[in-house]
Image (cartoon, rainbow, N blue to C red):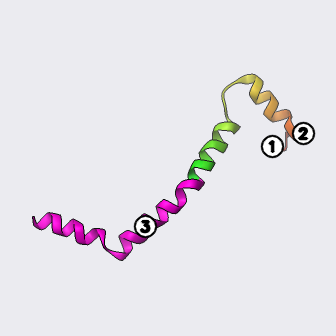
Amino acid sequence: MKIRNYYRDLGKSTAILSVKQGLTLVIPFLILGSFALLFKSFPYPPYQEFITAFLGGGF
């Protein structure tokens, strides 16, 4: 019972709530970055040739 109260109070801590909210706000950027990395390094040779030739290699 004491442990449950400790974790409940810890969950209401300002520091813990700030970290939780910050990580929640970062999730869309992490997903976007993951897809960008996937599209950039997709292991299919014709796709890689297209990416290197697209926009003169600027992509």
Q: Nearer the viewer, residue 12 or 34?
A: 12
Q: Residue at x 59, y 45 (%)?
A: 34
In screen coordinates, is 44 left or right of 34?
right
Amino acid type, callout 1: Phe
Residue 17: percent from the left, percent from the top?
38, 70
Residue 56, disc: 2
In screen coordinates, is 14 left or right of 48?
left
Q: Of discs 3 and 2, which sits in the foreground? A: 3
Read off the residue under disc 3. Answer: 19
27 up-or-down from 55: above or below: below
Which residues lie in the magenta part?
1-29
In screen coordinates, is 1 left or right of 28?
left
State the separation of the CA atoms marked 2 and 1: 8 Å
Residue 45: percent from the left, percent from the top?
73, 23
Q: Residue at x 24, y 72 (%)?
A: 9
State the separation of the CA atoms marked 3 and 2: 42 Å
Read off the residue under disc 1. Answer: 59
10 up-or-down from 59: above or below: below
